[in-house]
Amino acid sequence: MTDKAQGTAAGYRPAVSVVLPAYNEEQAIGEEIRSLREMLSRVAGAHEIIVVDDGSTDATFERGLAAGARGIKHINNRGYGASLKTGILAAKYETILITDADGTYPVEHIPTLLAELERADMVVGARVGANVNIPLIRRPAKWMLGMLANHIAGQRIPDLNSGLRAFRRETVLPYFSLLSNRFSFTTTITLALLGDDYRVVYVPINYLKRTGRSKITPWHFMEFMILVLRMAMLFQPLRVFLPASLAFLALGITKAVIDVATFLTQHDHPSVFGYPVLSTSSLLLLSVALQLGVLGLVADGVIRRIIQQHGPMPPSHGVHAVEPAAQADGGR
C-alpha cells in the first residue's frame, strides 16, 4: 500500500458503493465479496457491495447474497454495461467502485484507487503491473484498439477497458445514454471523459488469472472498434474526418499530377484550354477530400457549441432487487 493510500485509510474514509456485475460466476463470487468486504472495512467509511446478476443460470445470485452483498437480478441476460448501469443507479453512495466477480482484480489496489480519486474525476486500474495474465490471443486486438483510442484521445491511454475503476456517480450519469450495455461500457466512459477534458488517472495494477470461463468472444473486438469510432464522432470528429480528408486529398493530387503528365506527353502543342485534362477519378477524389474536411469542421464546431445534458436512465423493467443483510453495509 502506498503512503497516500495509507493516509487515506487512516484519515478520510469515503462512503463507497462497489458494483459487481456477474454472469455465471458461482465459482469465484463468494471469495471475491469476502475479500472486498475485508478491504472496505479497513479503508472506507459506510460501504456496500451490490451484486448485479445478469441472468445467470447457476447459483451466482444466491452465493452473492450468502456472502453478504446486496442482490439485484436481471431476469434476462442484458450485458455487462447494463449490469453496471443498474448497480450505479441503485447505489446508496456517490463514490462508485466497479470490479469483476471472477477474481482477476486484486483488492489490494483499492486503497490507492480511492486515494487518487480525491484529485481526479475517474481512477482506472491499468493492467500494466508485474503480474498481468492477459491471454496472448487477445493481445494483438487489444494493441490495435489501444492505438486507435490513443489517436482519437490525443494522448496515451495505458488501459482502455480495465474493469477496475473508481469514480463519482455524478460524473458518469450525464453519459448514460451513450454508454454501451455490452462489454464496451468501460471503453466508452474512458473516451467520453477524456473527450470532455475530465481528469482521468491511471494506477498500475496486477491482473490475475480468472476463475471460470471468459465471456469475451472475438466478435467483441469489432464492437469495441465501432464504439471507439462512434465516440470519436461524438467528441473528436476532426480526428476521424481530417486524416480521411488528407488521405483523399493526397490520392486526388497524385492522380491529377498523373493526368497532367499524361496529357502533356500525348500532345505536341499542349494547351489546357478546351481539353479535358483531369480525369473523373481525380475530380471525385478531390471533391471527397473537400467534403470530408468541411464536414469535419462543421461537426467539430457544432459539438463544441452544444452542451448536452443527459439525465439518469429510469429504472429498468425485468430487474429484481434483494436488500442486503445488515453486515453488508459495514454495520454502519
Image (tube, helix red, strand yellow):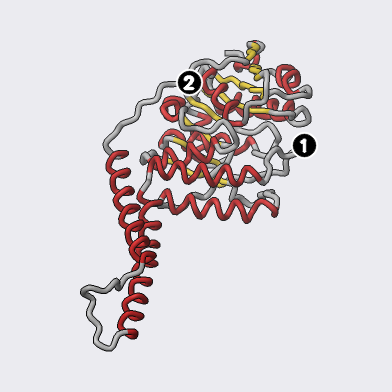
Numbered badge on residue 121: none
- Left or right: 282 in relation to 222: left
Q: Residue at x 51, y 22 (%)?
A: 15
Q: Amino acid at mark 1?
A: Gly
Quadrant of the snapshot with the N terminus? top right
- Left or right: 203 in relation to 278: right
Q: In the rendering, at what x and y percent does residue 113 appear?
A: 52, 36
Q: Residue at x 31, y 31 (%)?
A: 307
Q: What crowding class fits label 2: few (fewer than 14 Cα within 10 Å), some (14-19), or many (20 or more)?
A: some
Measure the alpha-carbon separation of dots 1 and 2: 32 Å
Outermost front residue: 274
Above or below residue 128? Residue 68 is: above
Residue indicated by mark 1: 212
Above or below residue 257? Residue 88 is: above
Helix, strand or loop at disc 2? loop
Above or below residue 41? Residue 237 is: below
Residue indicated by mark 2: 313
Q: In the rendering, at what x and y percent does residue 158 appear?
A: 52, 50
Helix, strand or loop at disc 1? loop
Q: Are marks 1 and 2 in contact (CB under 8 Å)?
A: no
